[in-house]
Image: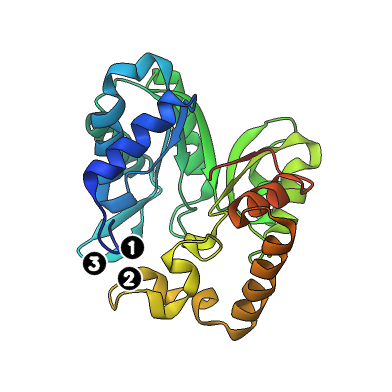
Amino acid sequence: GHGFGPVDERECLQVLRTAFEKGISHFDTAGFYARGQSERLIARALHTQRQQIFISTKGGLAWRENSVHHCGGRIELKQALCESLKRLKTDYIDLFQLHWPDPATPLNESLDALISFQKEGLIRFWGVGNLTAEQIETYIAPSANVPHQVHFNPIHKTTKSVLTIGHSGNRCLNCIVSPFEQGLLTEGRSSVGLEALGNRDIRRRNPYFRSEEIRSWLTRLSELCRTTKIPKVNLILLWILSQRGVDALIP
């Protein structure tokens, strides 16, 4: 709910429990999300199922009052990992990722820190997020198959080259995030665009929400969905999964 309008916490918990009951076992989060509240909710909903679920979380971004800071150094990442372990009420993370590269820290230093956490037994696997094509070529070795979270959807296709480079030589396992562009591509309230958002909603900074070109495209998409009788969210997910270079998707 942080930055996205009010939410019902009871409904959040029920969504997580229902997902587990329906067979979903991989839950992705980050210490950055809602200032740690996302991780706390997962712990509250699924703590007794810890051995049956796969938790991925992230470090490298932090709130300082109301501003966002990169923090990709070894000490900062270790602190973020320990805080996540505490919030999630677990003694290991299945997949711990660098949320974003830190401009003030050489990327290889951040990756070395993740590798050291794996050697310590604090995490099972490590991954990355939001790398450029050049960073992948420079820092991710062929055949490494490093999980890489990539922002990609039908209206945000600038990362297509990142997917291609990631698959080149099996450097990355490309995992798509934000498939619905913060709700704009769903059939919910936020699909209307800017006027559906509160004054303090962080999505007001997203240029897609104020684009007339995107609004026109979404109208045509809705007409297509009515014609084909395929729900919009299904169509979006199917389109993403059909793209070359996509390995996984977090809906």
Specify the label residue 66 is tagged with. 3
Mark 2 or mark 1: name the one nearer the start of the chain. Answer: 1
- Residue 225, compared with residue 139, is above or below; it is below
Visible in this render: residue 55? no
**Which residue is painted at 31% across and 34% down in the image?**
42
Location of residue 188 in the rendering, given as x and y in whole percent from the top left corner = 46, 61
Rounded to the nearest whole Å, what is the CA distance between mark 2 and mark 3?
13 Å
Quadrant where the N terminus lies?
bottom left
Location of residue 179 in the rendering, given as x and y in whole percent from the top left corner = 57, 54
Question: Mark 2 or 3, which is nearer the eye?
Answer: 2
Specify the label residue 250 is tagged with. none
Q: Which amino acid does label 1 sit on?
A: Phe
Question: Mark 1 or 3, which is nearer the eye?
Answer: 1
- Residue 123, compared with residue 113, is above or below; it is above
Secondary structure state at the residue bearing disc 2: loop
Residue at label 1? 4
Rounded to the nearest whole Å, what is the CA distance between mark 2 and mark 1?
5 Å
Q: Quadrant of residue 86?
A: top left
- Residue 72, compared with residue 75, is above or below; it is below
Residue at label 2? 201
